[in-house]
Image (cartoon, rainbow, N blue to C red):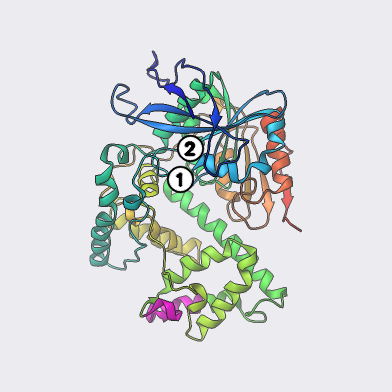
Amino acid sequence: MMTVGAYAPAASASSSGAPAPPPTWSACGGKVSAELQCATLTVPIDWSKPDGKTITLTVGRAPATGAAAGTVLFNPGGPGGAGVQELSRALPHFAGLRTRMNVVTWNPRGGVSGEHIPLASCAAGPAFATPDSRREYDQALKANAAGIAPCRDAVPELFAHLDSATQARDMDAIRAGLGEEKISFFGNSYGGVLGASYARLFPQRLHAMAVDSVPDHVDPFAESERLQYEGLEAGFKRFVRWCAGSSDCALRGTGVEKTWQAVVRRAERRPLPGAAAAGERRYDGDDLKFLAYGLVDNTADWPMLAKAIADAAKGDASGFDPQGRGMPPRVTAMLAVNCADGFRYDGYHAYRAAVRRSVKVSPNFSGMRENAWLACSPWAAKAVNPPAPLPARTLPPLLGVGPVYEYPSVRAVTDQVPGSVTVKYDGIGHGRYLNAGDPCVIGHVDRYLIDGKLPAPGTTCPAWPA
């Protein structure tokens, strides 16, 4: 694998890219598809110190199979998803796009590729916390700080520069290294935060931007959380409607929402036992909400979710966690990105206010998201890349894709720019292009990224496979 080159400091402080030697591509090796080519690019850890310490990014390219009309830079989300490996895995989904476009990706700084951080220290951090008092909150913060410390102490300078604005500068260095004046971007999931960050810093360098199943990083955090909850409730109501008409639903003929809410209240009063593998572990209402959320996300899991709720109503929570693994810890390096991007609460009162807001919006999952973001304090510095509006007048119209429960957050991003369109996927499932290979979604995204053709406003893709 050859080298693209080291970053050369640009003359303008507003630009992170500068002329660099053209990349010399070679086989990626390992388990990566032979169709992908790889190179490396050296960038500063701290973009305000271009002559300081550096890291090396692995860049991957799936070359156009026809006459190339441009380049699409792709990020799979995460944050920290290994772009090279993810593109390799889903390469058949990009076949149509590659007829006219080179598709380029990279393994981001601090990501799960383990190229920049010691995974043994950084793969697992704080567990989810569910404090109901100031004392419990303080205890959770101490535990969070202890969980973060091994990763932060292993790579302190890098750990302090994992925010998505810094990564957007990495993206622009890739663009410059490719010799492209403008580039198109396709972001899946958290890749939309990188896309929004790039759009704010380098709007003049975006030819087009498509985002699929992305969080809202343009509104204040409280508003983006409201949209997430509204979407989650919409997804749960789809489950309720399915249950009413399916013989596979163990709750058919019952009041599904009332049963679920009663289960949560019961578990809050007295946590429920789980599978034998869980040992003495008990599951409270917040545990069940988080575990149920993972099952709502996939229609194939709906029969399992219905049975888990029915069993929990009888005092058995084993269906939510059959292996007894409990709730997974937050991946430390991912948290360093989230917290720096403003997905956090500054103090106990802000946390409790957020919980109170969620109760009004989400009767079935309130508090779940708030618990997830507690890990950002007290070790994280103030957010350096908080949510902010996009420079609408200097950006091209955007294309969004959102399943039922993520459609509001995707719309929040695309509606910032006049002329943009968001395609609604009329079903459940995160990442319709990358993860599902949905032909309807792929068709709309490819036409937009290749020819700049947006679908008509109000376009919907049916649930797939039918």
**Vertical side of 395 occupied by 276: above or below:** below
Disc 1 crowd rating (10 Å Cα; few below 14, some 14-19, many 20+) is: many
Q: Is residue 263 visible?
A: yes
Along the viewing direction, whichever of 205 and 82 lies nearer the viewer: 82
Q: Is residue 411 visible?
A: no
**Vertical side of 398 occupied by 67: above or below:** above
Q: Which residue is mark 2?
A: 194
Left or right, 247 with respect to 128, comes to right
Quadrant showing the C terminus: bottom right
Which amino acid is tagged 2? Answer: Leu
Q: Residue at x 60, y 46 (%)?
A: 89
Q: Are marks 2 and 1 in contact (CB under 8 Å)?
A: yes
Membership of 338 in magenta stretch: no
x, y (%) of residue 183?
57, 25
**Vertical side of 67 occupied by 109: above or below:** below
> Outermost residue toward the top?
11
Q: Which residues are magenta?
A: 261-279
Label placed on residue 152: none
Q: Which residue is mark 1?
A: 79
- CA separation, marks 2 and 1? 9 Å
Which secondary structure class fits the magenta region best? Answer: helix
